[in-house]
Image (tube, helix red, strand yellow):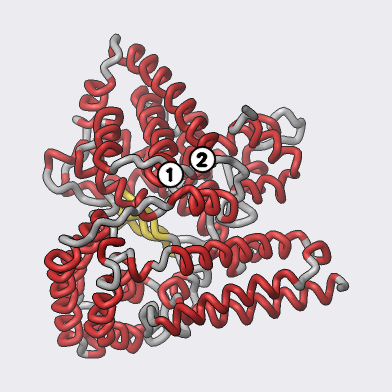
Amino acid sequence: MSSADAISRFNTVLAAYFRAWYRYHPETAVDLGVTDHAGALRPYGDDDVGALVALDEKLLDSLEEIDEGALDPERRLDLKLVRGHAVIELHELVERDWRRRDPVAFLPVHAVYQLTVRRVPDAGAALAARLAAIPHYLRGARAHLLVEPEAVPPLWVASAVAEAEAGAGYLRGLRGHPLVAARRLEAALEQAAHALEDHARFLERELAPRAAGDFAAGRALFGLLLAQRHFLDVTPEALRAFGERLADETRAALRRVTRELRGDEDVAALTRAIQADHPPAGRLLESYREAMEAARAFVEREGLVSLPPVQALEVVETPAFLRHQIPFAAYLDPQPNDARQLGRYYVTPPADDAALGEHNRTGIRHTSVHEAWPGHHLQFVTANLNPPARTPPRLLHTSATLYEGWALYCEQLMAEQGFLDAPESRFLLLKDRLWRALRVVIDVDLHTGGLAVEDAAGRMCSELGFTRGQALADLDWYSRAPTVPMGYAVGWALINAARDRLRTAPDFTLRGFHDRLLSAGSIALPLVLESRFGPDLWRAAAAEVFPPA
C-alpha cells in the first residue's frame, strides 16, 4: 500500500467511525464542537449499546488493514490513539456494562449545563429537546439499575443522589436564562427538575439499600488503561513504588522547609498559619482573577512558553451540581472550534467562613498557576489552536500524564522562575506534591489492592490535613476515574526527567522545550516525548522514573 493510499484509507475510516460514534456520545460530541446530536441524551438501549460494540469492533478490524508504516508520523500517532480508545471502550462495554453499575452516568444535568456554556447552533431547540426527554430517560434508567442492584457501588449511589438533588435546584435556577425565556421552557424545566427529585428518591429508597458493588477497576482494566490510554509500560506495583518513593522524599523535604520557616516540624501548625491569611468571602473570585492575571503577565514577560494568540478566561463559581466532586477549584476547557477560546476557571466557594483558609492568598497564586497560566488554560488552548493536535483521536483520547503532569510541573516552574516567591510557597509546593504522590498510591490501592474509601480518607486527613468531606469528595472522583489521579505526579516526574537530559544542549531554551512539549495535544506523555524528542529520550526518562527492579 502506497503512502497516499494508506493516508486516504485511514482518513476515510476515521471520518466514518466518528460520524457514527458521535451519535452514541452526544454530550462528548458537543464538547468537541460537533453539534449534530445536541438535542439528544446518551442512548442506553440494548440495540444502541450493541451497535456501539459493533462499531468499535469494525474500527479495530479496519485499522488492521492499514499499513501503519506507510502513514506519516502524525497519523501514526492518531492511529495508536484511536486504537487505544476503541480497545478500552470495548472492554468497558462488554466486561463492565455501565448501565448496570453507574447511576451517575445516567444523570442529564451536565447535558443541560453544557448547552448554556458551549457554542451550539439553535441551542434553544437543543435545550428544549433534552429537557423534554429527561423524565422518560430517568424512568428508563431505573429499569437498568435494578437489573443487578447489588452490582452498584454504594459510593456512586450517594454521589448520584447529591448530583440529582443539586441538579434539580440548578435547573430551577435557569428560569431567567435567555434560552429558557426565548423558548418559554419554564414548564419543561420544572418537569425535568421534578423528575430529578423523583429519581433521587428512587436512588435513596430503592437502590441504596440494595447497592453493594465494588467500584474498583481491577488489575486487568487498570493495566489496560495504563497501556492503552497513557501508553505506560509499567506494572501497578512499579507505579505504586514510584508514588511511595516520591511521598517519602517529599515528606522529608517538607519537614526541612517547615524547620526553616518556623523552627520545628509542625506541618499542621504552619498550614494553619498560612490559611489564616485569606481574602474575605466577598472578594474570593476577585482574588482569583487578580492572581490569574498576574500569572499571565509574568509568563508573557519572562517568555517561558508561547502564548496563544486568541484566548479568554472567566473565573466563576463552580456550578452547585458539581461541588460534591470539586472541593477547591477546576478548569473547563473551550471547545476546539470556539472562536474566542473561552475557558472557565471554577472556584468552589466554602460552605462557611471557617473554611476560607483553603483559599488562602499564597494558595490562590499556586492554584492560578495550575489551572490558568501557564497551566491548564494555556495548554488546552494551545492544543485547540494547533491543527495536528485537534484531530478527533487526540481530542477524545486524552491523558492526565500530559495535561495534569504539565499543570503540576508549572507550579514548580513558576517557583523556579520567581513568580511563586513567598517563603511559604516552598512549603505549599511540597505539600501539594505530597498530595499528588499519595494520589498515585491511593489510585493503585483503591483499584487493585482492595483499599477501602474510609481508610483512604483517613490517610488523606492525617497526612494532608483534609477534612473528611474534602477527602471523600476527592475520593469520589478517584473511584470513577482509575489511572487519572496517578497522572499528575507521573507526568510531572517524566517532564522533569526529560528536561534534565535536554537542558545541557547548547541550543536548549525553556520556551523551546515547552513549545515542543505542548505541540502534540493533550495526549499520553510517553507518546509526546517519543514523537517530539525521540525514543532514546523517552526510554531514558522512563528508566529514571521507573527504574528497573
Q: Tell me what residue is drawn at x 42 percent, y 52 percent.
A: 217
Residue at disc 2, secondary structure: helix
Q: Is residue 369 left or right of residue 233?
A: left
Establish if 460 lies above or below 2.
above
Q: Is residue 202 left or right of residue 271?
A: left
Instruction: Please say whether residue 286 is visible from this viewpoint.
Output: no
Q: CA distance from mark 2 to mark 1?
A: 8 Å
Quarter residue 452 falls in: top left
Which residue is disc 2 drawn over?
236
Q: Residues within 10 Å of mark 2 (few under 14, many from 20)?
A: many
Between 49 and 289, the one nearer to me in the picture = 49
Q: Amino acid at mark 1?
A: Thr
Q: Is residue 128 above or below residue 229?
A: below
Badge number at residue 175: none
- Image location (x, y in percent) of residue 374: 49, 46
Q: Position of residue 153 (x, y in %)?
A: 28, 57
Check whether the beta carbons of the residues at disc 2 and disc 1 lie within 8 A of each other: yes
Q: Amino acid at mark 2?
A: Pro
